[in-house]
Amino acid sequence: MDVLSDVMAIVRTGRPRSARVEWHAPWGQRFPAQPGSAGFQVILQGGAWLIPPTGDPVQLHVGDVVFFPHGHGYALADSPATPVGEADCDPEEERELFASASIAGPGAATVTLCGGYRLDAGKGHPVLRELPEMIHLPARLGHHPELRAAVDLLAGEIAGPRLGADTVVSSLLDTLLVYILRAWFDAPSQHCQTGGWSAALTDPAIAAALDAMHRDPAHPWTVQALGARGGLSRAAFSRRFTALVGQPPLAYLTWWRLATAARLLRGSDVSLGAVAAQVGYGSEFAFANAFKREYGLPPGRYRREVCPRPPEDAAWSPRRAHPSPA
């Protein structure tokens, strides 16, 4: 798997949620903070104002995508002057994968597409930790055609569900998340970052090494072999990797191997010996020692106590998109 796909596999848990909502002015809705989750809003028709907890309101137009990678709260309204109502919901009550709603009012209509993802905050990858509180991707002609296509498909599927809708919507939500992150990382000028993971993923030499580690974590990689992937000497590669990623190459490789092992322990019944082999440890004993240093528990106990098979995700409910009129 490539780096971004691996990151999603590590942090995504449960099923995503989505809703298509038709609002009629005047309307205003507050979406409370939800730690351990990420969410998005897309304007399909009309316009809206995003009201963050701090700072000035942001006007949103048709096609705009707003992503909240850390679950921070915000409000949406037809105007910055419209009072916003609180969500009247219990996240445990509704568990639909997708829903539609229409909020009655006398004014012009705005249609939004919203969604939420449950993330495993305890195993967060630094790629996601570096993201800002909010990512705004304005609609621009010819920009991000894949993202626009995924939005159109998702909105159409929710508006008129057919056979297989659960599978289609779930897949499209995952696809949409990847396209949002791609759009962000592909345009470093938007976020003015010259270092960190944004730069690492777009640096050919470092990206090649990361790709190699993620595709085959069990391989006995050396710094020299990883540097050769990008055409750099051992010393030059080590300096550049450490500067961008924040830790030396083999330290990151160890962290990634153990994060992959934790995912296998959470999501499968594979034996500890098999897990150790899949992430590059020659013995179960060596693997158990390394895992305990990183996670504070031996792998067997970690599997039993910390990460049992998760129940059906109820962390984000489309009922948040079923507010009473403001």
Image: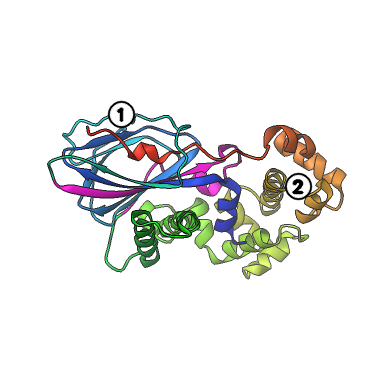
Q: Residue at the left extreme?
A: 106
Q: Residue at x 57, y 62 (%)?
A: 207
Task: Give how far across and how far down residue 81 sits, in percent.
Answer: 16, 34
**In the image, is residue 152 above or below residue 130?**
below
SS at circle 1? loop
Query: Which disc number belongs to residue 86?
Result: 1
Number of numbered callouts drawn: 2
Residue 286 horizontal side relative to residue 279, left or right: right
Residue carrying label 2: 269
Q: Which residues, given as a range, are shown in magenta? A: 108-137
Three-letter residue code for mark 2: Asp
**In the image, is residue 81 above or below residue 4?**
above
Q: Is residue 255 visible?
A: yes
Whether tag 1 and tag 2 are in contact, CB under 8 A, the answer is no
Three-letter residue code for mark 1: Glu
Residue 115 horizontal side relative to residue 108, left or right: right
Quarter of the image for the C terminus: give it: top left
Q: Residues within 10 Å of mark 2 (few under 14, many from 20)?
A: few
SS at circle 2? loop
Q: Residue at the front extreme?
A: 163
Q: CA distance from mark 1 to mark 2?
A: 42 Å
Pointer 1 or 2: first along the chain: 1
Task: Give how far across and how far down residue 242 sits, in percent.
Answer: 61, 52
Q: Is residue 133 magenta?
A: yes
Q: Residue at x 60, y 48 (%)?
A: 10
Q: Is residue 312 magenta?
A: no
